[in-house]
Amino acid sequence: MNDEERLDHWRDRMVAALYGELEPAAKRELEEALAGDDALRRDWEELQQARVALRELAGGEGREVEAPAHRSALLWSPPAQRGARRWLLAGGVGFAAAAVLFLGLLVAGLRVDRTPAGLLVRLDGSPAAELEAATAMAPAAGQRGVTRAEFAEVAQALFDGTTARLDELERRQTGAQVELTQALYDALAVRQERQFDDLRNRIELARANNGPWSAGDRHLPAARKGENDGTD
Amino acid sequence: MTDGELVVLSRQGSREAFGVLVGRWNPRLFRFLLRSLGDEEAARDTCQETLLRAWINLGRLREPEHFKTWLHSIALNLCRDRGRRSERREVALGDAAALDGASVEAGGVLRESERRDGVLLLETVLARLPMEQRTAIVLRELEGFTSVEIAAMTGVPAATIRSRIYYGLKALRRMVPVGGGSVLEGGTSR
């Protein structure tokens, strides 16, 4: 290990020790090295002093800085997250799959009858087992069939209701997200524009004070404080 | 309720749960960003964007209990993006800092104008450090992350993080004396 590597090694150990991240054996090794090396010990003391200074500054700042409220109505009625979108997507796919199945069942001989317990679904003339009992308890109710128009009406109402619900959910969640994103980017755009304006003004001021600026210059000419900038 | 439990509820669509997480971490996140970026307005913007991204990407968080570390990782990435953008602008337009008549180099003399009401601000001192050192110090010293956690957040080895802390602390020591908060007149920058 050359000198530089040795220094790096102890620097690493010192920082780890400073924050209590050093294993006991390594800590003992460091303590021995500190005891036998004045330069290293001075380094160690400086690090400790820097921490003290930093903590003093952190504890005695001249002002309290308030965390942003984030226009809570915006962000913390948060927009649709991916999970919700996945749910919406799953709902849409599920609905399409149900519609295909429904059409398939119609072709296969699906019938729907009205009963006191609701609609009785039959496939190819056979009542679904769980609804058979309900039909038996109210034998008269199952005798009148549902007309094609009634069936279509119920199916349409079911379809409309589900679609409206999905649309409403999507509109509400997408709307909130669009609103939030728009507000965020508007704020960023305004700020960026202001920064560019400020920089442009300062460049113009510097040019006015120091003559033409060559594009090959590394630095813009510095403005002389108090000249043409409205300060005394 | 733990962060992990709140994350799980948030993923199930509970806005209230995410609101609790925000209430819990927003002040600390903002303080971290303020110290990392050294600019209150930039910190506010970045804080808001961090929380927005956290909400949108909550499903990607593999370990809900590590919400705090994950949140700070997002904030760090945004800080880096912001740093890169401002570097590009400076390259394109020349050294804008020269127009201020103030040095931005680490270890330089802090001026009276860099104090507010006579009090040296922590952000002012931190702002004099290179971004990487500043971030490492803020995360380790002020936010209490271990160097291994910071390494995971930043994608660099823990030894590199400790090296950044070492050089950052040494630079701070030159800038700020212990006690009183007065300015050291050492280490000219130009």
Image (cartoon, helix red, strand yellow):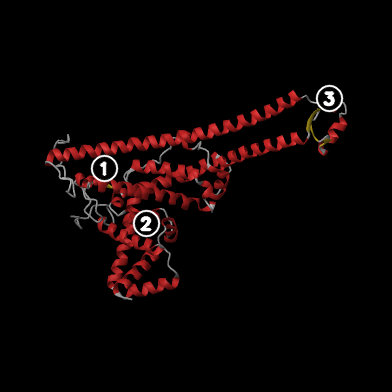
Q: Quadrant of residue A231?
A: top left
A107 or B168, nearer to the observer: A107
Determine if residue B134 is in view: yes
Residue named by callout 3? A144
Q: Judge left or right: residue A105 versus residue B94.
A: right
Number of the label disc, if any, that sits on residue B74: none
Q: Is residue A87 above or below residue A4?
A: above
Quadrant in which the N terminus of chain A is drawn:
bottom left
Residue neighbourhood size for the residue with mark 3, other residues' Cα within 10 Å, grouped as few (<14), some (14–19), many (≥20) = few
Residue named by callout 1? B117
Measured from the top left, where is residue B69 in percent x and y? 46, 53
**Residue that extends furthest to the left in the rendered view of this protein:** A211
B135 or A16, nearer to the observer: B135
Tell me the kind of residue under disc 3. Arg
Measured from the top left, where is residue A214 in percent x and y? 15, 45
Residue at 26 percent of width and 42 percent of height: B117
Residue named by callout 2? B136
Q: Is residue B85 above or below residue A44?
A: above
Residue neighbourhood size for the residue with mark 2, other residues' Cα within 10 Å, grouped as few (<14), some (14–19), many (≥20) = many
Choose the circle earlier in sequence order: 2 or 1: 1
Measured from the top left, where is residue B113 in percent x and y? 22, 45
Tell me the kind of residue under disc 1. Asp
Residue at 51 percent of width and 35 percent of height: A174
**Whole-Å distance between the Cαs marked 2 and 1?**
28 Å
Q: Judge left or right: residue B21 versus residue A215.
A: right
